[in-house]
Amino acid sequence: AQSVTQPDIHITVSEGASLELRCNYSYGATPYLFWYVQSPGQGLQLLLKYFSGDTLVQGIKGFEAEFKRSQSSFNLRKPSVHWSDAAEYFCAVGVVSGTYKYIFGTGTRLKVLA
Amino acid sequence: NAGVTQTPKFQVLKTGQSMTLQCAQDMNHEYMSWYRQDPGMGLRLIHYSVGAGITDQGEVPNGYNVSRSTTEDFPLRLLSAAPSQTSVYFCASSYGASSYNEQFFGPGTRLTVL
């Protein structure tokens, strides 16, 4: 069955520190992968996506993610976190299984310490 | 463009009542979907549509109905509200009937069932 796992429910980092949010997926074919960010009380906004080509993907707000097929992972990174990055982050996979749909992970809530 | 709009923003229902959550998009997107977001469970797909007149069930469809008579609108109906349906509901749309395109999310509807 297709699934997305985000093993870290909460992460706390200091402002200026580096960040890595983990995402693992289970899917039998080449996945379409997404990272979304949700600020409190808001809908989700796309940070970046991967569906082919270069496995290192650049997104908005200084985020990047690397697709590693051998590890079934699509981890999100940022070299220096800003206080405004505090939010919830969701990894998602787009699947084709008779029809088209998206499966989301359970999310990682990021707290940034001043 | 207004993007994806949802009404109402907040709603309180009593057990057994019915209601319709409205969702509209003005981007001429074929794909539309409804998710519910619950703490610790991320976003779970309720129903989705790949075009007018075509709908399908997602992961948690019980207790909900949808229809897609136009490209723009995708209402979600709660037939007989239950406390387990207390949640935040998000509508999303994307271009094309595929799962490799970015989804655009509405601001959400916070529903409480007493």
Image: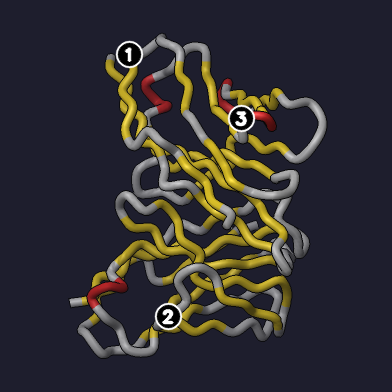
Position of residue A50 measured from the top left corner of the image (x, y, whole percent): 71, 37
Q: Which residue is mark 1?
A: A14
Q: Write down the quadrant of residue B79 in the picture.
A: bottom left
Kindly identify the amino acid type of the residue bearing the numbered disc 2: Asn
Residue at x 70%, y 81% (from the top left corner): B54
Q: Position of residue A81 (x, y in %)?
A: 44, 17
Task: Report which residue position mark 3 lands on.
Answer: A71
Residue sitting at x 53%, y 71%: B23
Q: Secondary structure at mark 2?
A: loop
Q: Secondary structure at mark 3?
A: helix
Q: Is residue A12 left or right of residue B30?
A: left
Q: Quadrant of the C terminus of chain B?
A: bottom left
**Which chain is home to disc 2?**
B
Q: Residue at x 30, y 52 (%)?
A: B39
Q: Nearer the viewer, residue A37 or A53?
A: A53
Q: Are marks 3 and 2 on the same chain?
A: no
Q: Tag on residue B62?
A: 2
Q: CA distance from mark 1 to mark 3?
A: 28 Å
Displayed quadrant of residue B49: bottom right
Q: Give the chain letter at badge 3.
A: A
Q: Chain of mark 1?
A: A
